[in-house]
Amino acid sequence: MCGIIGILGNEAVTPLLLEGLKRLEYRGYDSAGIATLINGSIARRRAEGKLHNLATLIENEPLQGTIGIGHTRWATHGRPNETNAHPHANSRVAVVHNGIIENFQELRGEMEAAGHSFETETDTEVIVHLISDGLDRQMSPQQAVAAVLARLEGAFALAIIFAGRHDLMVGARRGSPLAVGYGNGEMFLGSDALALAPLTDRICYLEEGDWVELSYQDARVHDASGAIVEREIKQTALSGALIGKGQYRHFMQKEIFEQPAVIGDTLHSFLNPLTHTIQLPDLPFGLDDVPRFTICACGTASYAALVAK
Ligand code: GLU
């Protein structure tokens, strides 16, 4: 499970994005990156490996800007290298994505046939091409995103910025969580409230299928049908220092509700989406030679173990 953070702010955004990404490190990742707008143009820094590598790169090649998106990637499509690290971008739009676009091959084929050339092995890059294709057809950024969302299959959370639009960020969620943070004249997006904790304590969790337009002052949430909807803004008790319970009442509730995502994340690292096959890591023994398994568990896990038996 990778991490997303987006900040539409008034001060230098890169250190805040890096701090937010640090707070998402617990989710696991293999590379990281940040995109901002500098005088309206998209600029990016990305690095393979730990955040330290990205921070060092940014020390050597600073990244200005007051609006930006950051990402820690857990590769599902394409190697964990700098080219495949998010944000993915062209001169018009930059995107970070958590999850999987199931129908990316079909969409990529369509975009390639229309003359777009791809730089990465990821499923995510197709979103960049589809959105800029919409912009080329004179759609507004919001219209372009809505049209693309209607075509995507799979599970995702997205944060998107647009060249020339310091005042706009779009987020979307389907299957993967995404929270909106409300500041004073600033707005935020994050994979969870924890990433946003140092920035604000006013959080709204998007619901399944929602997408959101952020401006400096407000968030306009649309549901999957496009209708504008109200989502409750909650006061979180998370402090900047705390690894918290998110919107849950207690950690056990959090653990129970996170199980589908955790199992999905655990399994998806073994799925090859291109061949639709399961690829187990190399084991130091042949499974056929194992005479007996022992599963140790207590509580509900022991029932799961009995099912396995
Ligand atoms: N599917 C995307 C990729 O492989 C996003 C992975 C993630 O959730 O970090 O780049």
Image (spheres, rainbow, N blue to C red):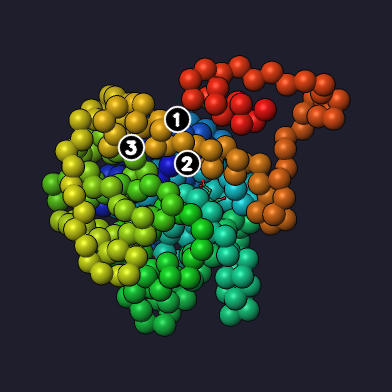
Coordinates of residue 28 in the picture (x, y in percent): 51, 34
In this picture, is 204 found above or below 94?
above
Coordinates of residue 122 in the picture (x, y in percent): 59, 56
- Residue at numbered disc 1: 26
Dot 1, crowdedness within 10 Å: few (<14), some or many (≥20)? few
Dot 3, crowdedness within 10 Å: few (<14), some or many (≥20)? many
Q: CA distance from mark 1 to mark 3?
A: 11 Å
Q: Give the mark, 1 or 3, whose residue is nearer the N terminus.
A: 1
- Residue at numbered disc 2: 261
Q: Nearer the viewer, mark 1 or mark 2?
A: 2
What's under tag 1, amino acid-wise? Tyr
Coordinates of residue 112 in the picture (x, y in percent): 62, 74
Q: What's the residue at 23%, 38% (across, down)?
A: 199
Q: Please, what secondary structure does the residue beneath circle 1 have? A: helix
- Say whether residue 239 is left or right of residue 178: left
In this picture, is 277 found above or below 23?
below
- Residue at numbered disc 3: 195
- Say whether residue 115 is left or right of residue 278: left
